[in-house]
């Protein structure tokens, strides 16, 4: 049975690295693997944009299911918000998997990723905040997001000290259950 999977987590937990590994590993005839924000992020992003993109990918997932494919979306999905967009009666079954990392790891990864003036400017445009504030928000919300997933018994994969290949292997184990 085809499903749509959202690989979630705050920035810096390894979603993009996992996306790349999933594309190398899974059969494209069976899985359509996409980046949540591949259509672009407007200035400041925000929940309206996130809900709209989630809806777009749910509709895409339904089309893919009609063609015999499951869909994997790598990008932020909060189960509390997701439940307001996903309609279990009309949408295909969905599962959200959290990638989680320590605050230290998130900060280190984000500082490494945003080391050029251009990348700092882009994250500030997309998030509507300074890089420092963006990192602070990601690290502080990661604990809250983990609690939201744990409360709902949703899968959580810790990415500290793991290679993208190791994380991807864990994601695939969940998907293929």
Image (cartoon, grey):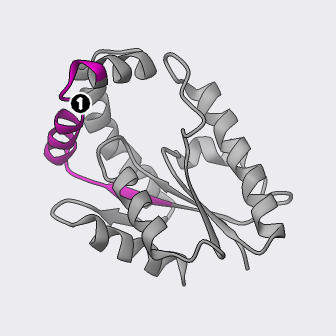
Evaluate whether residue 136 shows in this view. yes
Residue 177 image position (x, y, % from top left): 54, 84
Q: Is residue 115 magenta?
A: yes
Of residues 146 and 55, the one drawn nearer to the viewer in this rendering: 55
At horizontal 19% and vertical 59% (from top left) the residue drawn is 160
Write down the residue under mark 1: 114
Is 112 located above or below residue 89 in the figure?
above
Residue 22 sits in quarter: bottom left
Of residues 152 and 171, the one drawn nearer to the viewer in this rendering: 171
Q: Please give the count of numbered marks on the rendered protein.
A: 1
Is 40 located above or below residue 126 in the figure?
below
Residue 161 image position (x, y, % from top left): 15, 63
Of residues 177 and 150, the one drawn nearer to the viewer in this rendering: 177
At horizontal 55% and vertical 44% (from top left) the residue drawn is 36
At horizontal 41% and vertical 16% (from top left) the residue drawn is 125
At horizontal 72% and vertical 43% (from top left) the residue drawn is 56
Quadrant housing the N terminus: bottom right
- Magenta residues? 97-118
Residue 67 image position (x, y, % from top left): 81, 70
Query: Is residue 136 toward the left or the right of residue 174 in the image?
Result: left
Q: Is residue 112 magenta?
A: yes
Secondary element under disc 1, as helix, strand or loop, is loop
Is 114 located above or below residue 149 in the figure?
above
Q: Residues within 10 Å of mark 1 (few under 14, many from 20)?
A: some
Query: Is residue 16 toward the left or the right of residue 96 in the image?
Result: left
Residue 119 image position (x, y, % from top left): 29, 25
Evaluate whether residue 155 shows in this view. no
Residue 120 sits in quarter: top left
Residue 39 sits in quarter: top right
């Amino acid at each position: 049975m085809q499903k749509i999977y959202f690989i979630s987590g705050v920035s810096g937990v390894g979603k993009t690295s996992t996306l790349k590994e999933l594309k190398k590993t899974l059969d494209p005839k069976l899985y359509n693997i996409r980046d949540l924000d591949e259509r672009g992020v407007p200035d400041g992003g925000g929940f309206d944009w996130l809900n709209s993109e989630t809806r777009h990918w749910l509709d895409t997932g339904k089309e893919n299911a009609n063609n015999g494919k499951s869909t994997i979306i790598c990008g932020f999905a909060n189960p509390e918000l997701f439940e307001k967009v996903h309609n279990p009666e009309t949408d295909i079954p969905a599962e959200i998997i959290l990638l989680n990392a320590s605050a230290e790891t998130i900060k280190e990864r984000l500082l490494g990723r945003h080391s050029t003036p251009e990348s700092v400017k882009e994250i500030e445009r997309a998030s509507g905040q300074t890089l420092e504030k963006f990192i602070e928000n990601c690290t502080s919300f990661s604990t809250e997001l983990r609690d939201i997933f744990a409360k709902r018994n949703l899968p959580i994969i810790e990415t500290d000290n793991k290679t993208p290949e190791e994380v991807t292997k864990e994601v695939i184990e969940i998907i293929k259950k």
